[in-house]
Image (spheres, rainbow, N blue to C red):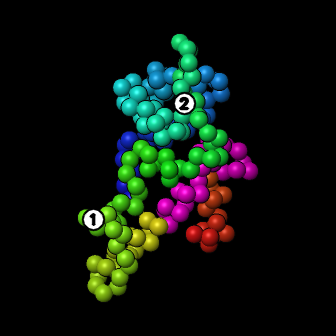
Amino acid sequence: MKITAQEEYGLRILIRIASCEDRDGMSIPQLSETEQLSQHYIAKLTRLLRMSGFIRSTPGNKGGYIVAQKPSEIVIKNVLEALGTPLDKEFTDENGAVMRFCTSSVDCSSRSLWQMIQLTVNNLLERITLEDLVSQNDSKNTIFDALSPEFLNKL
């Protein structure tokens, strides 16, 4: 699994927007200043997030971006896929077909390990929402709660 800069910064921007308490949201210049990224790059990332339905713009000269859905409904795996390629793309053949687990050679055995790790990461990312990331400071609802042994057994 590879996380690109676009996926990393896009997720950070979405978290920043979701954390904003101003009902007008955050503007591109504000996001640029807080994330230390160019306004052009912020505009590109917010466009991807807006076209995917995660954020929407607010009108007016003080307008900006706000989340378009409840943070509890925004699944992080979907955000990362909207910002880049599907996370399990590395484990498909050249035609896009999913490669099956095999144990007939060392190469197949190691590939099976990476596939199992990818599957576990995908399952975890399907359970983490934007709300989990925004409310990390809330002691009763942290992302680390998701890593409890009970949770991991469900994967």
Tell me the residue that label 2 is attached to.
56
Residue occupying the point 41% across, 57% down = 87
Say if the magenta span includes residue 129: yes
Which quadrant, please, contains the C terminus? bottom right
Instruction: Estimate the x, y position of residue 121 in percent, counting from the top left.
Output: 49, 62
Q: Residue furthest top?
A: 61
Where does the image place residue 113, in percent across and percent down from the top left? 40, 74
Tally of numbered discs = 2
Vertically, is 36 above or below 92? Answer: above
Q: Nearer the viewer, residue 150 or 128?
A: 128
Work out which residue is located at the far right of the displayed protein and give it.
Answer: 140
What kind of element bears circle 1? loop
Q: Which residues are magenta?
A: 120-142
Label 2's element? strand
Asked if residue 33 is among those painted magenta in the image, a careful observer would answer: no
Residue hosting label 1:
95
As displayed, is residue 82 above or below residue 148?
above
Mark-to-mark CA distance, 2 and 1? 35 Å
Q: Residue 17, image x and y in percent?
A: 56, 32
Q: Hey, what amino acid is under mark 1?
A: Asn
Q: Residue drawn at (65%, 46%), measured in percent from left and top?
A: 72
Q: Is residue 51 left or right of residue 108?
A: right
Position of the N terminus by quadrant: bottom left
User: In this orientation, which residue lies closer to the viewer: 54 or 140?
Assistant: 54
Visible in this render: residue 34? yes
